[in-house]
Amino acid sequence: MKYRRLGNSGLEVSLLGLGTNAFGKRADQETSTRILHHAIDRGINFIDTAKIYAGTESERIIGEALAGRRHEVVLATKAGLVRGEGPNSRGSSRFHLMQELEGSLKRLRTDYVDLYQIHTFDPNTPLEETLRALDDMVRAGKVRYIGASNYAAWELMKALGISDMKGLSRYVSIQTSYSLADRTPEQEMVPLCLDQGVGIIPYFPLAGGILTGKYSFADRAPLKSRAQTDPSFGRFINDQTLTLSEQASRIAGEQGCTPSTLSIAWLMERPAVSTVIVGATRPEQLDENLKSLELNPGSEVLRQLNEISEAFRYGKPFATYRLT
C-alpha cells in the first residue's frame, strides 16, 4: 500500500481509501464486514462514511466490524446534510453538529473520529460558529482533524481565512466530485488546495460506475448497478459520458488493464489528491481497484486521458450536494 499525507497535516492515509455508502444498502452487514476487513488486511487505512449513509446503518455496521481493529484505521465521517424533519436537523450549526457527533460516536463505537467533515456548506450558519464548534471538538479530544465536503472554492478559502485569523482548527481536506468525467475542480479548487495545503479526497472517482465500462449506448442498466438501484442516477448517463467511457475503455485495453484501474490511476496522479475513495459491494471489486496502485501510466497514456476528458473541465460538476 502507498500512503500520503492528508494535505499539510501529519496524518498519513492510504492512497486508496474505502467509501462505505453501500454498506447497509447495496451490501448487507455480513458482506460489508467482509469488505471492511479485507480492505484493512490489504493496507487500506482510510475508511470514509457519513451519518446519513443508509440511514445511519453504514456507521453502525462499521462500528461493529471494527471491534478490536479501531486502532488500525483512520476513521472519517460527516455531518451537515438533512437528517429528520426538525428545525435543527440539518446544517452546520453548533447545536446540530454537537448532537450529530455524539450520535456518530455511539454508532461507530469509538471515543473519537479521526476526520470529521462538514458534508456541505451551510449558507444559514456563520462560518465562525461552525469552525468554533469544530475547534471545541478537537480540543475535547473527540475529533482529531477536520475537513469539508461539497464546498465551492470561495467558501473553502473563506473558512481557511477565518480559522487563520481566529486561531481555530483548520480544514485539512476537501471532498469533491473529481474524475475523468468531472474535472471542474481543476479550475479553482485544485490551485486553492495546492496553495493552502489542503488535501483533495475525490468522490465518484469512477463517475458512479460509468467509467467501469459496464454501461453502453444500449438503454439498459446492468443488474444491480447504481442506475438500476437508484433511478435518479440515470441523469448522468448520456452520449457525452458514454463516449468518454468507451474511449477510456479503449485506452485501458491497449494497456492491458481495466478502465476502472486506469481511471483511478489517472486520478492518483493529479496534484493535491491525498486519497481516492472507492466503494465496493463485494471484496472482489476492491481487489480490482487495488490494481490501480501497481499501474504506472506513462506520460503518453496520461496525455491521451487528459485529451479525451478535456471537455469535462468545464460546465457543471458531475455531482454536488447542497442544502436547499
Image (spheres, helix red, strand yellow):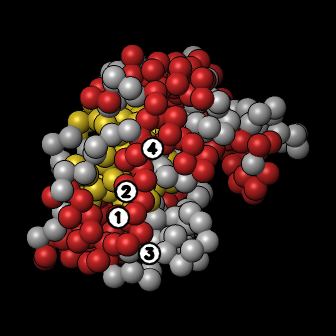
Above or below residue 37? Residue 77 is below
Above or below residue 205? Residue 152 is below
In space, the residues marked 3 and 4 are separated at their CA atoms by 24 Å
* Closer mark to the observer between disc 3 and disc 2: 2
Q: Where is residue 273 in the image (x, y as percent from the top left)?
A: 34, 45
* Mark nearer the N terminus (4 vs 1): 1
| Element at label 4 | helix
In space, the residues marked 4 and 1 are separated at their CA atoms by 15 Å
The label shown at residue 98 is: 1
* Mark nearer the N terminus (3 vs 2): 2
The reply to whether the C-beta atoms of the residues labelled 2 and 1 are less than 8 Å apart is yes
* Mark nearer the N terminus (3 vs 4): 4
In space, the residues marked 2 and 1 are separated at their CA atoms by 5 Å
Say which residue label 2 marks.
101
The label shown at residue 107 is: 4
Badge 3: residue crowd in 10 Å (few <14, some 14–19, many ≥20): many
* Residue type beneath disc 4: Arg
Depth order, front residue of 134/279: 134
Number of numbered discs overlaid on the protein picture: 4
Q: Where is residue 46 in the image (x, y as percent from the top left)?
A: 36, 35
The label shown at residue 10 is: none
* Residue type beneath disc 3: Asp
The reply to whether the C-beta atoms of the residues labelled 3 and 2 are less than 8 Å apart is no
* Residue type beneath disc 1: Met
Say which residue label 3 marks.
122
